[in-house]
Amino acid sequence: MIWSCGAALVALIVCAPLAALGWQAWGASAGHWSHLAQYVLPQAAANTGLLLLGVGALTAVLGTGSAWLVSAYEFRGRRILSWALLLPLAVPTYIIAFAYLDLLHPIGPVQGAIRALLGYDSPRQFRLPDLRSLPGAVFVLGCALYPYVYLSTRAMFMTQAANVLEAARTLGAGCYAAFWRVALPMARPAIAVGLSLALLETLNDIGASEFLGVQTLTVSVYTTWITRSDLASAAQIALTMLVIVVGLILLERHGRRRQRYAAAQRMRPMQPLRLHGWRALLAAGLCALPVMLGFVAPALYLLWETQKRLHLVGGVSRQLWAAAGNTLAIAGAATLITLACGLVVAWAARATRDSGRRRLTQLYARAAGMGYAVPGTVLAIGLLTPLGLFDQALSALLGTTGLVLMGSAAALVCAYAIRFLAIACGGVEAGLARIPPSLEQASRLLGESAGGTLRRVHLPLLRPALGAAALLVFVDAMKELPATLLLRPMNFDTLATWLYGEAARGTYEEGAVAALAIVAAGLIPVILLARGQEKMPETRDRDQKPKRTAVDRHDPAPVHGDAPALAGAAHISDKQP
Amino acid sequence: MKSPRFALSTLFGALCVAGATLAAPALAAEEVTLYTTREPKLIQPLLDAYTKESGVKVNTVFVKDGLLERVKAEGDKSPADVLMTVDIGNLLDLVDGGVTQAAPSKALESVVPANLRGADGSWYALSLRDRVLYVEKELPVNSFHYEDLADPKWKGKVCIRSGQHPYNTGLVAAMIAHDGAEATEKWLRGVKANLARKAAGGDRDVARDILGGICDIGLANAYYVGQMKNAEPGSDARKWGDAIKVVRPTFAKARDGGTHVNISGAAVARHAPHKAEAVKLLEYLVSVPAQTLYAQANYEYPVREGVKLDPVMAGLGPLKVDALSVADIAKYRKQASELVDKVGFDN
Amino acid sequence: MTASLELDRLSLAYDTPRGALRVVDELSLALPGGHIGCLLGPSGCGKTTVLRAIAGFEPPIDGRILLDGAVLSSAAHCLAPERRRVGMMFQDYALFPHLNVQGNVAFGLRRLDRACRQRRVAEMLEMVGLAQAADSYPHELSGGQQQRVALARALAPSPELLLLDEPFSNLDADARERLAFEVRDILKHTGHTAVLVTHDQAEAFAIADRIGVMAQGKVAQWDTPYNLRHHPATPFVADFIRREALAERRAAAYARGARRHG
């Protein structure tokens, strides 16, 4: 009972900014809408659709392919690559976009090298097509977002596929046949989960899309608000997008409904096939490619630019340290609160016995995840009204002067929590789903109350799921920009806003130090996450000393589950000055 | 794996939340609070100079977008004293949104020309930025009309940032005021046909792309020129700056040919807790030392007459401001934005 | 420990979108203290539901469940599972994977002080023959060993009644037979009252003192194994027992043949 009240409260808080947006949208005049519908939306919708298709295809190929190679085969460098493939999660899409714009610019290193090879002197004689186009955006976003697909697909390959693949082998299927006819179809649900996350990120991306000149729906939300000063119409577009997203998620969930029960098979790791010679090199090369494109190239670019500027910048300034401290504090607080709320919501959905009430708590869980489907800025705008109302109510009740919540770090933490709650909810839900009900019953019959069971049985078993969710929320919170820019307190900078401040005048390379700091700070959680995934169940050997893999065996990867289960890259949104 | 990090985070989080909710207001008298959309790096030197001279602490909140929404939501409890922003449209939105108040001041009125401030001191321009033509330095272009950008002879040679960006819609609005909506629409279509690459990126990318051979001419704000040409030799920015030269375009139909300018400006917030301090800050910002900083450090054109300019900017020649009232630009802004959409300029 | 169990016209139903689906209908039986009872029947006959009701996870819509004369469940009032002195063994063992054997067995012994707890755990492990496995984790044990740990864990807090939910169905035939006899021995030794649920006749006949043949939510006959075989109350019971026995004889004949020719 108390859990479902808590869940209801959380769901209410998450929906508050959305309701405020709806109220804003109500005020839009018809004239604006007809102009938008005629001139803006068709092209924006077409661009968005094409972008989603392209990014979907690219991430599916990169993510699934690399996951398969890393799971099914053994070759030199596989161990490193298996976690390195997650590294692009640490780099915001915006940074990847401007890194490539610089790298691939006619006067940049890549084209310079090509010209030198071909014997041309100046870019006016020869140059490659511009990155600022739809294909360019597909490339950038694909390289940045494939880790979602990689994460979920790899977990599935490593735990589910063993029996079936061995059966296929005994029936005469070779490597390729095993992949195409067995592994790939089996991995479809996992690919769907990863894809839905990547596509959600793409849909809500503003930074890279705008920078590369692709007019997507989200970009038009932005421009409608900023340049037309028409918040109402912007809210309308945003809410329409939200409805479409929710519709898609429901559709996907419905399609996966039956498949969830198939996951309850025995978990066994695959026996990888050893590769030699050129095959091993090929496999390593193919796996290294996404890492190079999505992480190494941008990171090297940032390092290079930083060292160029280091003597100008005069080392790392005190303000940068302060910004770093703020970032860690806010991200840490947001992670804790988000996890706690996610636990409340997911547990409420699980613990209710009454079927009528259960549907309600499941609704709360879905509602709580809505914050993720909305771009950061839109959420922040929506949040302004409830915060203002809250402060006014507080002053009416307690007579406090001045603002309490608005303009405080607490408001920022609140915004982050609403935004990233879906990650925590999904992660905890997936973790809970893997704990058989008989464990709970056993605990109850051994005299433990429901709360005690949660504490002594479920929480320890949820540790991997909670840990992974915590890491992802932390990384996201650290990189968050648009909501932070809008809601932050006075004299307060995070690494992301610092980067924005440096880059705002187009002096992107001077923001390189801050960008590097963001990437570096994001690396640690991502690597921890990757290492956590690495602890896969070993084959049973009772003669060995007991290792503490008891938990991992039953909880191989907290990735299966519902659409907004995990997420990674933030919505760095940046408007050019 | 989780324990040490979580302990640390809890500590941080607790401190942060405690600090934040405690720290919200309780402002001393010797303080003034500024909400601005201008980039911190540009404003901070000015504010530091003010604090040094007057001893008044300046609290700043840098808001990228949504200044109006934030101040509105804060309501009468808002601690904002001064609202500073870029682009006349944004500034007038603040005034029209009811979050500013009239702040008449003799000092300000004597410095800022009448067409660059609001009646009753509802807003004041603090600096000007002209929108000029960057040209590949070897090309024989010495004078230019904005309308010439649509000339087919420049096909495939024009770079410009997004048509919806306020700097560009301001220019389009000015063109509507001068030439009428129909001619402007034709012009936009002509420019779009001349584009060498998508209308995206920033103003400095125009210079970079000229160096990179993607285009030969483009429109951008003048202050970047000062920044680029004054950059360290050998740095990227310097290379871009050295690749271009600048021509100040005028409107063909205007009798007194002038260059289009936009402004950065400020207003006093409606519920400012320290109104007097707010006006003092504004007065400081139009004083000689501040305006000199604007001119020399930011390479913007000062609103005060007779301020010494940076040599590079001075080398561009005297600026003849387009006679059109700045407020008119704001009037046609929405129409300009709709035209840009209609033409599909950014697609 | 020798509590008697009585089910008095127990009725259980599931909530479906189309209304309540009655799974168990006016089921009555009495199990004297210290005896081992069994609910035997095909899948879907409601036997597991009855077990869960006795454990306290399913509230009855009618009828009562009494343990040693005290009402555990009735349509009006249902005592929470953790307050019933009932232990349970599960089909999937349900050992806590994050605790070792020692931790698992000690789980229900919170109220004892440390020394008592350790003694009790040792005693229980000794009883099931797993004293040397105290530090192992569940995944390191075989199915049979895990089920023994589950037994030790369930009996450690001295419950008044032990429930067994198809506890041997996940084991191979050999382990199943062995474990079934062992469990009966242990229960007879400790004197616990127990209720077993299974679809396997051999198991039922091996362990139980009283067997209730169930079909479609009702008990067709609640009697000793001997009486069921030789004095079936209804044709259904006779058929059920005979069919199973026939299959058994066939399996035994095949095995004999294989041994002869193998």
Image (tube, grey):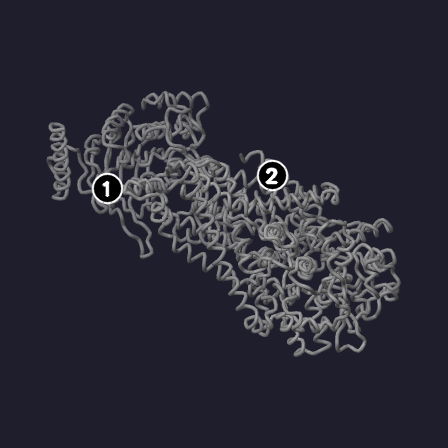
Q: Nearer the viewer, residue A576 or A542?
A: A576
Q: Which residue is mark 2?
A: B10
Element marked by disc 2: helix
Element marked by disc 1: strand
In the image, is A543 to the left or to the right of A30? left
Q: Quadrant of the N terminus of chain C?
A: top left
Is residue C107 in view?
Answer: yes
In the image, is A433 to the left or to the right of A120? left
- Residue C134 vertical position relative to residue A215 in the rendered view, above or below: above
Q: Chain of mark 1?
A: C
Real-space CA distance between mark 2 and mark 1, rounded to the nearest whole angstrom: 56 Å
The residue under label 1 is which amino acid type?
Ser
Q: Which residue is mark 1?
A: C28
- Residue A246 vertical position relative to residue A175 in the rendered view, above or below: below
Residue B205 falls in which quadrant of the image? bottom right
Q: Chain of mark 2?
A: B
Q: Quadrant of the C terminus of chain C?
A: top left
- Residue A368 vertical position relative to residue C83 in the rendered view, above or below: below
Query: Are tags 2 and 1 found on a single chain?
Result: no
The residue under label 2 is which amino acid type?
Thr
Is residue A449 in view?
Answer: no
- x, y (%) of residue A226? 65, 63
- x, y (%) of residue B302? 83, 62
Q: Nearer the viewer, residue B123 or A266?
A: A266
- x, y (%) of residue C27? 24, 43
Residue that protrudes farthest toward the front in the picture: A119
| Nearest-to-viewer mark from 2 and 1 | 2
- x, y (%) of residue A298? 60, 47
Residue B7 falls in which quadrant of the image? top right
- Residue B141 vertical position relative to residue A116 in the rendered view, above or below: below
